[in-house]
């Protein structure tokens, strides 16, 4: 809710009771830039009238006094300036800048920080900017606490938790930027009496539980999750604020937190409409004494299976007339689809790109080349993908193996328990990519590289394509050429050549948008975007007889600190490892114009 108070044909006061920024609020604030802006606080309902009476009365009185006295604007002396006045309210309209960020709106003040909406100028992106208060920038303790908190939050990498972009220390200002949360907070949804159906409740609980298990299993200290930390977007997705902190806390708080969140969720249920979900939440409340996050997840899964079986058992066989109708409808759809193909119906440009240019392969001529720090090696001619495998290409693979014998493509050593090649978080990020939306706080599309694939997935995909993964020697020759270049483009450093490896993107980007991280042969993204699986295995230095897979190349995190990613050799703990930092590309020893099926 946004309240606008009009006095003498002018807007004097804007009250934001939503507790977060939206494009509508930003537009209103820009339209009435001379108005006073107030964020309605989290207070008990009994105190709300007093707050309104007190704050609005001040505005009215100030306005009336200014009319009677016709006074000039008040000038505040520097030595009287309140150290707690938000930075955005002190700087001039043209000067609300810290480095690459322009402050556009003050959100709220906390114990040691103030939070603003800011625009990252270089990539025209709105972010949340958390700033250490100015009077604390002289305190060594406060500075170190702030830095540790930023480091803790930066360690979090979960698709449903708000992403921290980067920390800065600029001209005496200490701040970090993170994803700007949109949508309705759970706290406000409860206050406004919004009700959710059974499916929405289950979806919400699954995200909450999954994020808390992630924090717990990765031993990331965090504050208890509050209703104000949970955001429900208009498309039904749920985002969780980054609650990571530098301080470890007592694990017993988990039980209290679980109980609090279940109670909060109960307020969203319309008991008369969804008695089953209400009964389920009550049963959870009765078992909170022994309920852990892991047990919570099991109960949700069990309830999902229960309601799924109920739906299946209650369904009846459709009448023959209905079957005939759908068969006729299916035939009609096939006819229309065929006509569309014959008539060359216009398609989306990105789909055309996906089906043509994206599957390009680059020929790398055989012969000698410099490997690592001067070693001369010899390789035969091969062809390697110009681009990293994309989400769109991987979706084609998943669809194809549904109708095929998946065993033809799996590696002989693939674990028995691995029965699917669907990547972790696939349903979430594929849906976002299809809509051109955001995943883990970042833009994603069907032309972005596929992520959260393990080595077994990459191996199976390559085999399905009639190809294989590159060895790390083949990968390095593709990136460094025959003469052992330091960078994909040559030996000029990024600063000297004015090349920006990550192209101002904070995470993965569409593979065809990489225009700077290119080899002379035209291979894209070897030093940026995502690191890549190779077929190479190396002896585990810690476990005798065990092998670990080698990954090569830079990614959206590493390339910022160390632009020279062509020499680095990295190994992960096992071939089942998955990360948003790792993708892959394929290679063939045979001219790709001559296609064949290696699975037979």
Image (cartoon, helix red, strand yellow):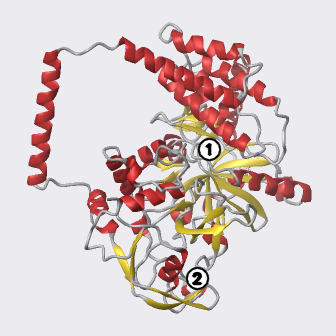
Question: Which residue is disc 2 drawn over?
Answer: 494
Is label 2 in a helix, a strand or a loop?
helix
Indicate the position of residue 37 as horizontal and vertical percent values: 63, 40
Establish if 296 lies above or below 244. above
Question: Which residue is disc 1 drawn over?
Answer: 161
Is label 1 in a helix, a strand or a loop?
loop
Indicate the position of residue 223 as horizontal and vertical percent values: 77, 38
Quadrant housing residue 334: top left
Marks 1 and 2 sit apart, C-alpha to C-alpha, by 32 Å
Establish if 463 lies above or below 383. above
Question: Quarter holding the C terminus?
Answer: bottom left
Question: Quarter holding the N terminus?
Answer: top right
The residue shown at (48%, 64%) is 584
As drawn, is 552 to the left or to the right of 400?
Answer: right
The residue shown at (56%, 62%) is 506
As drawn, is 410 to the left or to the right of 74?
Answer: left
Near-viewer residue (487 or 463): 463
Near-viewer residue (8 or 374): 374
């Amino acid at each position: 809710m946004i309240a606008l108070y009009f006095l003498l044909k002018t807007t004097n006061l804007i009250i934001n009771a939503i507790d977060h920024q939206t494009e509508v609020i930003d537009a209103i604030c820009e339209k009435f830039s001379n108005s006073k802006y107030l964020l309605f606080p989290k207070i008990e309902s009994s105190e709300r009238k007093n707050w309104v009476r007190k704050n609005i009365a001040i505005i009215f009185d100030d306005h009336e006094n200014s009319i009677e006295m016709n006074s000039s604007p008040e000038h505040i002396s520097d030595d009287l300036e309140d150290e707690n006045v938000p930075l955005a309210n002190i700087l001039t309209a043209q000067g609300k800048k810290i480095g690459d960020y322009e402050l556009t709106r003050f959100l709220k003040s906390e114990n040691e920080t103030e939070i603003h909406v800011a625009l990252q100028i270089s990539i025209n992106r709105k972010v949340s900017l958390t700033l250490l208060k100015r009077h604390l920038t002289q305190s060594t303790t406060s500075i170190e606490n702030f830095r540790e908190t930023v480091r803790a939050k930066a360690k979090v990498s979960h698709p449903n938790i708000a992403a921290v972009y980067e920390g800065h220390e600029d001209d005496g200002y200490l701040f970090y930027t993170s994803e700007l949360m949109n949508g309705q907070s759970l706290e406000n949804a409860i206050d406004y009496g919004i009700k959710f159906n059974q499916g929405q409740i289950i979806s919400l609980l699954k995200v909450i539980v999954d994020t808390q298990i992630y924090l717990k299993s990765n031993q990331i200290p965090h504050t208890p999750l509050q209703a104000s930390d949970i955001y429900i977007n208009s498309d039904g997705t749920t985002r969780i604020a980054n609650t990571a902190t530098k301080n470890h806390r007592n694990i017993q708080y988990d039980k209290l937190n679980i109980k609090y969140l279940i109670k909060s969720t109960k307020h969203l249920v319309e008991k008369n409409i969804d008695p089953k979900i209400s009964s389920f939440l009550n049963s959870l409340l009765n078992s909170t004494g022994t309920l852990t996050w892991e047990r919570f997840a099991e109960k949700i899964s069990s309830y999902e299976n229960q309601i799924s079986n109920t739906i299946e058992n209650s369904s009846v066989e459709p009448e023959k007339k209905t079957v005939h109708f759908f068969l006729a409808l299916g035939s009609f759809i096939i006819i229309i689809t065929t006509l569309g193909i014959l008539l060359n119906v216009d398609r989306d440009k990105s789909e055309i790109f996906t089906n043509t240019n994206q599957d390009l392969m680059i020929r790398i001529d055989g012969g000698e080349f410099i490997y690592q720090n001067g070693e001369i090696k010899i390789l035969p001619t091969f062809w390697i993908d110009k681009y990293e495998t994309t989400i769109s290409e991987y979706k084609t693979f998943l669809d194809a193996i549904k109708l095929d014998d998946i065993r033809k493509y799996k590696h002989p050593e693939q674990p028995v328990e691995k029965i699917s090649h669907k990547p972790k978080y696939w349903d979430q990020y594929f849906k976002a990519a299809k809509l051109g939306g955001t995943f883990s706080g970042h833009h994603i599309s069907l032309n972005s590289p596929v992520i959260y694939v393990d080595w077994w997935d990459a191996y199976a995909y390559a085999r399905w394509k009639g190809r294989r993964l590159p060895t790390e020697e083949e990968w390095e020759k593709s990136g460094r050429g025959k003469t052992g270049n330091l960078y994909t483009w040559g030996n000029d450093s990024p600063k000297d050549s004015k090349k920006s490896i990550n192209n101002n993107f904070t995470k993965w980007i569409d593979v065809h948008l990489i225009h700077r991280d290119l080899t002379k042969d035209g291979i894209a993204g070897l030093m940026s975007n995502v690191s890549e699986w190779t077929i190479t295995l190396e002896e585990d230095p810690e476990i005798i007889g065990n092998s670990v897979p080698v990954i090569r190349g830079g990614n959206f995190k590493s390339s910022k600190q160390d632009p020279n990613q062509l020499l680095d050799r990295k190994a992960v703990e096992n071939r089942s490892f998955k990360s948003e930092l790792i993708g892959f590309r394929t290679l063939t020893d045979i001219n790709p114009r001559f296609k064949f099926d290696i699975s037979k």
